[in-house]
Image (spheres, coloured by chain):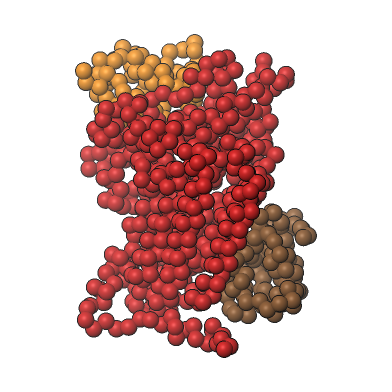
Amino acid sequence: MALLDRSRWYDIARSTNWTPSYVAESELFPPDQSDPYGIPTAEWETFDEPYKVSYREYVNVQREKDAGAYSVKAALMRSQYYENADPAYLSLLKMHYGAIALSEYAACQSDARMTRFSKAPSMRNMATFGMLDELRHGQIQLYFPHQLVTLDRQFDWAHEAHHTRNWATLAGRHALDDVMMTRDAMTTSLMLNFAFETGLTNVQMIGLSADAANMGDFTFANLITSIQSDEARHAQIGTPVIEIMIRNGKKAEAQQAIDVAFWRIWRVFALLTGIPMDYWFPLEKRDRSFKEYMHEFVITQFERQLLDVGLQRPWYWEQFLDDIETHHHCQQAGIWSWRNTVWWNPTGGLGPDERDWLEQKYPGWNATHGKYWDVIIDNLRNGRPEKTEAVGMPAICNMCQIPISNKGGTQWKARIYQREHEGRRYNFCTPVCRWVFDTEPKRYKDWNTIVDRLYNGEINPPTAENILRYMGSGVVSEGGRDAHGYDWVKGYDRPGTEAAE
Amino acid sequence: MASVALLSRLQFDAHTRVIDVDAKFTMDQVAAACAAPAVGYQTTHPDPSKPLRVRRTTDDDSGIALPRAMTVAAAGFTHFECVDVYVE
Amino acid sequence: MTASKPATRSKNMAGPLLRGGEIAVAACEAIQEDNPEKQVVIEDHRTYVRVEAEGGLIIRRKTMEEILGRPFRMQELEVNLTGFSGQIETDENYMRWYLKLDL
């Protein structure tokens, strides 16, 4: 039997609002779960999603996507790719799966909240598909690394990371809980669908795929672009929410939600994406620098989309541009130095040629970040590898949960931005993280960073060994070490290199 | 013995650090404690010919170095107070 | 696949990002056919192809069917549509990427 064109029945099928008679509307849609902005239901009923799909189409297309991803995986398993892969590349996969797999399940809950509590019937419809998308992403990104656990126990973090108190997990979870898990349906959509999915997932899921393909890992390249094809659809839930909010005098509220979420996710994704792109891929496999991807997908593409839906670039845009030059470099250095705290094996990866590349992509790298590595390289070349392992603790940001660092060497940029609130002193990495706190101190004030936990008795005794155990390092798997056993330092033995005097 | 956790900004260091100092420590001892996990690990002494000084961190970097013999107790440092450790 | 790049990028570019492969090749051809008045810019990044033009682009189901030589449901493009610049409009018979503001 021939099918009716979708457009002939779609409007009827998605008009599912009714007038409640047994309960008040405020009970059916409690404002703190549905819409704290007080926009009339009739306005939400005008929600018209730009990217339409029917259930029949959805199921057909998703089946095809899954078939593609699984068949590529099955074909490449025969090549023993992972058994022979560069250990730094495997670290990228360990970090990715540990950070992302269970976050997808969390996103499934966020979409479920929109499905249940949105006053816009069309949004509920689209969020149902979004919910199923995230379920697929959770399952497939647990299934793919599962086969690798036998190869290397650190892959078990794909499943375990979110259940630990590892500092990197705390950073990711704090941001995602803020943006996806503890907001009403409309704010979740602004923060998750627009700021996060439209704004930042492209760099991880598309940009990284180009580098992964250069490494010959078509399984991963195919997987993440397949996931991103779902994101491209359900991210569109956010656009009509913004339009309706602007039309109803809530532009400032929409802008603030996006400014908060974009910054929060950026601080985490810079580590997840920026570090592997600029440090872990072998030089000849790097497609472009992280900064160049950020320019393509965020500074050009996302900024233009923001303007087009009637919003402005976030107020901290200049600080953000500076952070693109700084943040992930500092954290590559810090993570490598405190490598026994993480569940992957980062590589220093900084031979003379890699430094030239970084200097070219990030002018001034040698005079700032490079000075840090000069000390490390000197220690490694002179038989003091123990001095490359950090001692003590860095100060941690009370918002992003990431060590507070900035350009050093010939500059002195690392600075702690503090706020006194109800007798407690909070520390922030940037004025932006402090601003996020100021938008809603009540939301954030009771959280403790890993450093706070050393002083409030939660990590007891506060010894170096016990801190690692608390974070799951040495428990779920052994902690990180240099992926290449410091082999990358050998480049300096070559006459004429900067460090070979 | 009473101790306090300071947040240290060592000149030219990329990281800020949490440093436990004893109430009896002089500022010279504070500076040494702040330099200990950084210098030779991830950074160098900003100028080995000069002593490291300690001042309270301020937004405009206008703080004055505290006397080298002053103790932590006398300086009145409190939990998570930020200090700059630097050469003049 | 041909790649061309203008000297300076306009602020009003919009269009799809496609996963590299058979559908991307066909879609690039269809887009050029469906937007004869536009200068279509195609950047091939191996795992994804960025296809854009000033003010946006349209792709029609009918054109895809002619190029592929088989029936094509517009929704099938989603399998290979990893993202896009600008905004999107979807219909059974076409997909369109556009911008509301001219900057």
Q: Is residue A306 above or below residue A45?
A: above
The residue under the point 45% across, 65% down is: A132
Q: Find chain C in the image and tell me its colour.
A: brown
Pick whichever, A74 or A183, lies toward us. Answer: A74
Q: Is residue C56 above or below residue A456?
A: below
The residue under the point 62% across, 44% down is: A80
Please identify the quarter of the rendering in which residue A275 is found: top right
> Where does the C terminus of chain A fall, quadrant-wise?
top right
Q: Position of residue A117 (x, y in %)?
A: 33, 70
> Where does the N terminus of chain A fall, quadrant-wise?
bottom right
The residue under the point 49% across, 75% down is: A55
Query: Can residue A159 be seen at all in this image of the molecule?
Result: yes
Pick whichever, B47 or A42, lies toward us. Answer: A42
Pick whichever, B16 or A153, lies toward us. Answer: A153
Q: Find chain B in the image and tell me its colour.
A: orange
Specify whether A242 is left or right of B6.
right
Q: Position of residue A299 (x, y in %)?
A: 57, 53
How many marks overall? Answer: 0
The residue under the point 45% across, 71% down is: A126
Specify whether B69 is left or right of A231.
left
Q: Position of residue A279 (x, y in %)?
A: 59, 37
User: Which chain appears red?
Assistant: A
Specify whether B58 is left or right of C4.
left
Q: Is residue B80 above or below residue A277?
A: above
Query: Can residue C13 be seen at all in this image of the molecule?
Result: no
